[in-house]
Image (cartoon, helix red, strand yellow):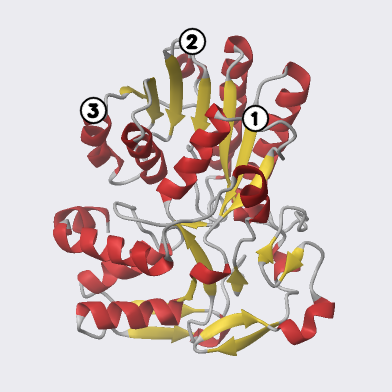
Amino acid sequence: MVKVLITGAAGFLGSRILQWIRTQKLDWEVWGIDNLSRKGAERNLAILENLGCHFIQGDIADPTTIAKVPTIDYVIDCAANPSVLAGMGGGTLRLLKDNLEGTFYLLEKCKADQAGFVLISTSRVYSIAALNQIPLSVENNRYVVDEQQAHKFPVGFSAQGIEEHFSTQAPISLYGATKLASEQLAMEYHHAFGIPVWINRAGVIAGAGQFGKIDQGIFSFWVYQYLLDRPLAFIGYGGHGWQSRDLVHPHDIAKLVVQQMTEPVTGAPRIVNVGGGKQNTLSLAELDTYCAGHFKKSTPVQAIAENRALDIPMYYTNSALAKQWWNWQPTYTAEQILDEIRDFAKTNREFVEAIS
């Protein structure tokens, strides 16, 4: 029987990947590790138990936690402090332990067991300075690419989005730096010790049950604030809410991860982008319009013109490599994802109140 370890198992992404694995009827023995540091993570423990996960509460940056896991065949590393603002106001050492030191101990486990390693990385490894060089215009309350200025596109960008060879030069945020370093470390273990490594740079992940914070999980956060009648703010870029991002559902990511583990393709790139793409991109202003329409009410939105540190006006993913090599593409539309979040919030108000 294949034995798989999921880190960050009680988090939004880890628990949803496990859900998808079980729907595929894979005869896998699944182990999970989580330190339960995220508010609301303990609420997913019942999900893990019902799905037959052997759960270990602990920290992946603690080798004694890793030592509790039996010999495994694959690690799916979803554990991270995923906030782009993490470490900015203190807690930098904790960020490094969560996002980089933990990766080292997991890779050591993979080396010892000759196991494969899948890293869920992030679009935040890409250069903020280069992203801000993309020529933009405004259409229908959203920043869009000004294709008339294609000659000004930075290397690694096309009208279809950010590609894998886009610049990763600093600044990318402390969070992005830890994930980029984890990618490099994983690739070195792949070349030095021959362990299979797959790295998926995910765009904005969203769906039902997300913990939803202002600095991570913004689409869920916005829906939850509407449900609870709490004020909101368009922060930066004039306070218009034109900033736009693409959305991807965790089950779409899970589909690619399982395919990489079970159907490895010779010659396939080890690092690919996975995101909703241009067709599944929304601005905050559009998100607010959606919420106002579906909740049948208006929630006050403050306009704060000044930009936050490390913010970017627009991001969407070009997942052409994943499609070329794995025939992968997102199956959930942006509207389907928002509908799922809305329906979950309405039927799980206690959960939303507890994490907000």
Q: Which residue is rendered at x = 59% and y = 47% of the image?
A: 327
Q: Is residue 14 visible?
A: yes
Q: Which mark is residue 166?
A: none
Q: Position of residue 17 (x, y in %)?
A: 40, 39
Q: Position of residue 316 (x, y in %)?
A: 59, 66
Q: Is residue 3 above or below residue 273?
A: above
Q: Which mark is residue 49?
A: 3
Which numbered disc flags the more N-terminal residue, 1 or 3?
3
Q: CA distance from mark 2 to mark 3?
A: 21 Å
Q: Position of residue 170 (x, y in %)?
A: 75, 56
The three-letter code of the residue at mark 1 reads Val
The quadrant of the image that shows the N terminus is top left
The residue positioned farthest toward the right in the image shown: 151
The three-letter code of the residue at mark 3 reads Glu
Q: Which mark is residue 71?
A: 2
Q: Position of residue 96 (x, y in %)?
A: 59, 38
Q: Is residue 120 above or below residue 137?
A: above
Q: CA distance from mark 1 to mark 3?
A: 28 Å
Which numbered disc flags the more N-terminal residue, 1 or 2?
2
Q: Which residue is rendered at x = 52% and y = 45% of the image?
A: 91
Which numbered disc flags the more N-terminal residue, 2 or 3?
3
Q: Which mark is residue 197?
A: 1
